[in-house]
Amino acid sequence: MNTVFSALAAAASGALGAMGMGGGGILMIYLTLAAGIPHAKAQGINLLFFIPTAIVAVIIYSRKKLIDYKIALIYGVAGTLGACGGCYVSGMLDNNILSKVFAVFIIFIGVKELFSKAK
């Protein structure tokens, strides 16, 4: 039964991630709460899971000519620098603190999305 839930969480995360809806949040919650994996290790698994999903999404959106490569390069470089910095900081934090920071971030984003107006 655990394998079935793992497969469902992976499929949901992949599908939502490919649509740009943050499937990594679902995967992180599943890995830490249901699978009992420490938060730092779950982050690594989440990032590895993101790579093939991102490649497929780039191929599909590129074929539809929906990617502005100039802007993508700027955000890609900034995102890479942010990821390196976040990796460094998360390595210095205790797992419990890291989990709490992640929870506050997810709640903040959820509340922001819940009350933001569509443009």
Image (cartoon, rainbow, N blue to C red):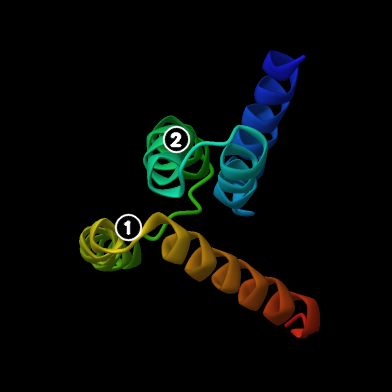
Q: Would residue 43 be found to the left or right of residue 105 on screen?
A: left
User: Residue 103: percent from the left, percent from the top?
Assistant: 59, 66
Q: Neighbour class for label 2 at 10 Å: few (<14), some, many (≥20)?
A: few
Which residue is labeled 1 in the image?
69
Instruction: Provide the secondary structure element on which disc 1 rests.
Output: helix
What kind of residue is marked 2?
Ile
Does residue 81 lie above or below 45 as drawn? below
User: Residue 34: percent from the left, percent from the top?
Assistant: 67, 36
Which residue is labeled 2 in the image?
59
Does residue 21 lie above or below 62 as drawn? below
Q: Where on the picture, by quarter, is residue 49?
A: top left
**Residue 97 or 51: which is nearer the viewer?**
97
Q: Where on the picture, by quarter, is residue 48?
A: top left
Does residue 4 lie above or below 24 as drawn? above
Residue at screen point 55% across, 72% down: 105
Q: Where on the picture, by quarter, is residue 93?
A: bottom left
Q: Are marks 1 and 2 in contact (CB under 8 Å)?
A: no
Q: Neighbour class for label 1 at 10 Å: few (<14), some, many (≥20)?
A: few
Residue at screen point 38% across, 47% down: 40
Where, quadrant-wise, is the N terminus in this rendering?
top right
User: Residue 109: percent from the left, percent from the top?
Assistant: 63, 73
Mark 1 vs 2, N-terminal side? 2
Q: Would residue 77 be found to the left or right of residue 26 on screen?
A: left
What kind of residue is marked 1?
Tyr
User: Residue 80: percent from the left, percent from the top?
Assistant: 24, 58
Where, quadrant-wise, is the C terminus in this rendering?
bottom right
Residue at screen point 68% across, 32% down: 9
Q: Would residue 101 be found to the left or right of residue 84 on screen?
A: right
Residue at screen point 25% across, 56% down: 91
Instruction: Provide the secondary structure element on which disc 2 rests.
Output: helix
